[in-house]
Image (cartoon, rainbow, N blue to C red):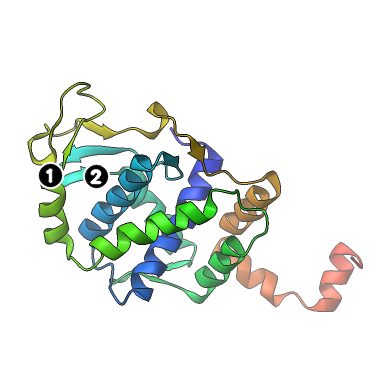
Amino acid sequence: MRTIEEQTIDRLLMLYMIQKVIEFSFTVYGRLKFQKLSFLVEWGLMKQNLKALHFKFFSYAHGPYSKDVSLDAKFLVEREFLRGDYPYAVTEMGKNLLSSFLTSSELPKCSSQLFEQIEITLKRWAKYDGSQLRDEVYKMRITPHDLPGRKMRIRNIPVYTDILVPEAYTAKQEFVLSDDLLEDFLYEFSLTPEDRHRIAAITDVEYEERFGDL
């Protein structure tokens, strides 16, 4: 099960992935494509001995599937950081949050390697639609988490078999957030759209009366 920090990192990197796909002039049209892209990105990071995403994947009807990916995308839509009518798109508020994340001076040393590897994976695979990605992923030969010692094509992995379990592997480098950054982004993610409207409606005078002259 993901920690609060891991969940926060996953949501930030989810926004980053979607925005990068758009910048590469492709789209994320449908859940099938996004599930497979998320799997390929996380798998690519693992192959580079870098742990950053924490999505657990199991074998399902169309290959690797993660409940965490679906729940995080739903959360970002509800918080209005992501537009949910396909294709996915990062909202202006999401872009502002992403900019704060990417320009922070407190990111760990492995950040450049992380973003570079994500871009490499997306440049290779984002041009495909969902069904094409599914077929390409089916061809991959991996050792599923639940079947140690057995290397097999993803197409042949039994349904409900755990394929990728982040907490079960370690890496030479791990992307983490400083306490200050984690606190900042936890706060941003805690605000509902209604909260933001209420905050925006507070005048400077009302703010000073409530919170004092900071």
Residue depicted at 28% across the width and 73% down the height: 26
Residue type, numbered disc 1: Ala
In depth, the one of 176 and 48 nearer the eye is 48
Visible residue check, residue 65: yes
Out of 69 and 180, give the one closest to the viewer: 180
Q: Quadrant of the image for the C terminus? A: bottom right
Q: Nearer the viewer, residue 110 or 62?
A: 110
Above or below residue 179? Residue 208 is: below
Query: Residue 213 has which mark?
Result: none
131 over 10 or under it: above or below:
below
| Residue 63 in picture, x, y percent from top left | 16, 44
Relative horizontal placement of residue 189, taking residue 137 as reference (left or right): right
- Residue 83 at least partly seen: no
Question: Would residue 172 be found to the left or right of residue 209 on screen?
Answer: left
Tell me the quadrant of the picture where the N terminus can be found.
top left
Name the residue carrying label 1: 61
Q: Residue at x 21, y 43 (%)?
A: 64
> Disc 1, disc 2: CB below 8 Å?
yes
User: SS at mark 1?
Assistant: loop
Coordinates of residue 170 in the picture (x, y in percent) = 44, 30
Quadrant for residue 33, please give it.
bottom left
Kindly identify the residue that appears in the image at 38 percent across and 46 percent down: 45
Badge 2, how many Cα within 10 Å: few under 14, some, many 20+? many
* Numbered label attached to residue 65: 2
In space, the residues marked 1 and 2 are separated at their CA atoms by 8 Å
Residue depicted at 29% across the width and 48% down the height: 39
**Residue type marked 2:** Tyr
